[in-house]
């Protein structure tokens, strides 16, 4: 029986839902000290960098019809890839908890039923989304996305047309740091985009639609958060909704935007779980990720996620740099090996370089230079090693 493929429209819809996120709106509030014009420029530059990488990562999975963590094995070997699968499951469970935490706080700010109650409501809806399954969500997702789109437009009107620009505080964030914080959000999706593009009817078109739709919507969410802080002097998005009289409509924005985004994290945790141990059933690993994330959101405070975002960048930026070098430049597949030692060493160097660059203020952030250097090192090292291996083989014959 032929496997059902997702259309370009369905892929775009999935990534629209990924972009509409309370976490992204909250992250946008951090840009307020730069002022709206400079802050928006940093957001756009960061998303161009991040979404270009997102496109390349998704294209690898779309072309090879492999999940994100299975494509990692093509560069790092079958066992080397398991290391990244474990890290990916951990970061996805972390994201699930953060998203539920943010959503529950915002929902409770609109309708005070207790944060833990909203954690359970949002967690329960995420589990429902998982059980329905990605291929059966078409009509539900279309209705949810249409409602979110309309309600987000109302939120924009409240912030940008009913408010007025207020004086901003002294800059507490450099432009380079702002760019990096903008890159970090699309970068966090790198280890899972192939879980969706591998099913696409038209891999290139679907991947392009995914990256472009996500990039535009994510910029929009950042702008809403930044605008809220600048035009209303209020960084609590729930309070803005309450003051605007959105009430139930605001509550729907919060709950469904959290569910449609966090569902992708939990779902991909399940797919990554299958890469670690093939006997695992992805759907039930995803449900477990949602349950653990819900418990984490109830038990632990998760207000500031900037360090978490930077940690994700330092792990996955050099990983995808190695994959880009292997797939697009070297045309190399190491999935038949247990470990690709050179790839692993290059990743360690890339990770160390990212952490070092974090101490420097670079106008384009540190992800782009880190990935560029990592790609150059990877290509050079593998060509040198391949040349040395050929020379050694010729001498022994």
Image: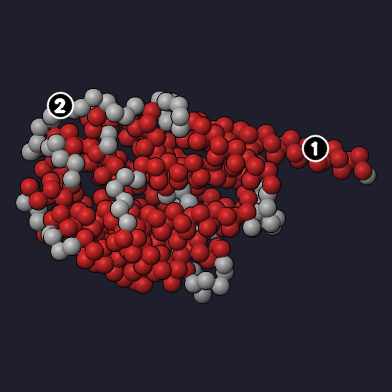
Give how far across and how far down residue 232 sits, in percent. Answer: 12, 37
Q: Residues within 10 Å of mark 2 (few under 14, many from 20)?
A: few
**Residue 83, placed above or below residue 234:** below
Task: Determine whether, in the image, residue 72 is placed left or right of residue 361.
Answer: right
> In the image, what residue occupies the spot 87% across and 43% down?
393
Q: Earlier in the sequence, mark 1 or mark 2?
A: 2
Label drawn at residue 137: none
Q: Nearer the viewer, residue 299 or 122?
A: 299
**Residue 167 numbered tag:** 2
Image height of 115 relative to 168, above or below: below
Residue 265 placement (x, y as % from top left)? 39, 58
Q: Indicate left or right for 206 with 174 as reference.
A: right
What residue is at 21 percent from the left and 66 percent from the top? 117
- Outermost residue to the bottom: 1
Specify the color scheme: secondary structure
Task: Give residue 259's quadrant in the image.
Answer: bottom left
CB atoms at circles 1 and 2 under 8 Å apart?
Answer: no
Q: Residue at x 42, y 28 (%)?
A: 364
Q: For marks 1 and 2, give the CA distance.
A: 62 Å
- Residue 233 visible: yes
In the displayed structure, does residue 388 sit left or right of residue 374? right
Q: Is residue 387 above or below residue 9?
A: above
For mark 1, give the secondary structure: helix
Q: Is residue 130 left or right of residue 144?
A: right
Q: Which quarter of the figure is the C terminus placed in? A: top right
**Residue 69: image x %, image y %?**
53, 56
Q: Residue furthest right?
A: 397
Q: Determine if residue 213 is in view.
A: no
Callout 2: SS: loop
Q: Residues within 10 Å of mark 1 (few under 14, many from 20)?
A: few
Residue where numbered disc 1 is placed = 388
């Amino acid at each position: 029986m032929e496997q059902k493929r997702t259309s370009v429209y369905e892929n775009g819809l999935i990534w629209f839902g990924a972009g509409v996120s309370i976490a992204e709106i909250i992250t946008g509030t951090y840009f307020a000290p730069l002022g709206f014009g400079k802050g928006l420029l940093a957001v756009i530059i960061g998303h161009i960098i991040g979404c270009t990488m997102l496109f390349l990562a998704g294209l690898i999975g779309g072309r090879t019809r492999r999940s994100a963590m299975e494509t990692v094995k093509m560069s790092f070997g079958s066992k080397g890839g398991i290391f990244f699968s474990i890290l990916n499951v951990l970061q996805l469970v972390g994201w699930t908890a953060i998203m539920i935490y943010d959503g529950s706080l915002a929902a409770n700010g609109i309708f005070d039923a207790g944060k833990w109650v909203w954690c359970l409501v949002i967690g329960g809806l995420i589990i429902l989304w998982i059980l329905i399954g990605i291929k059966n969500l078409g009509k539900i997702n279309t209705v949810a996305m249409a409602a979110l789109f309309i309600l987000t437009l109302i939120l924009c009107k409240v912030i940008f047309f009913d408010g007025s620009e207020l004086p901003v505080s002294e800059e507490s964030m450099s432009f380079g740091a702002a760019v990096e914080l903008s890159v970090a959000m699309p970068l966090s999706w790198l280890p899972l985009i192939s879980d969706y593009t591998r099913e696409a009817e038209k891999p290139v078109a679907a991947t392009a639609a995914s990256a472009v739709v996500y990039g535009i919507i994510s910029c929009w969410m950042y702008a809403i958060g930044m605008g809220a802080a600048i035009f209303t002097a209020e960084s609590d998005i729930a309070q803005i909704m309450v003051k605007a009289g959105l009430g139930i409509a605001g509550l729907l924005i919060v709950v469904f935007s959290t569910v449609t985004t966090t569902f992708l994290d939990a779902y991909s945790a399940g797919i990554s779980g299958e890469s670690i141990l093939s006997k695992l059933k992805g759907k039930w690993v995803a449900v477990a990720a949602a349950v653990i994330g819900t418990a984490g959101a109830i038990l632990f405070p998760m207000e500031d996620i900037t360090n978490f975002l930077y940690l994700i960048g330092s792990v996955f930026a050099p990983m995808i740099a190695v994959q880009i070098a292997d797939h697009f430049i070297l045309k190399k597949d190491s999935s038949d090996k247990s470990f690709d030692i050179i790839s692993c060493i290059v990743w360690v160097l890339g990770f160390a370089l990212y952490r070092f660059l974090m101490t420097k203020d670079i106008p384009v952030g540190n992800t782009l230079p880190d990935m560029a250097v990592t790609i150059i090192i990877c290509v050079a090292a593998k060509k040198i090693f391949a040349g040395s291996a050929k020379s050694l083989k010729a001498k022994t014959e």
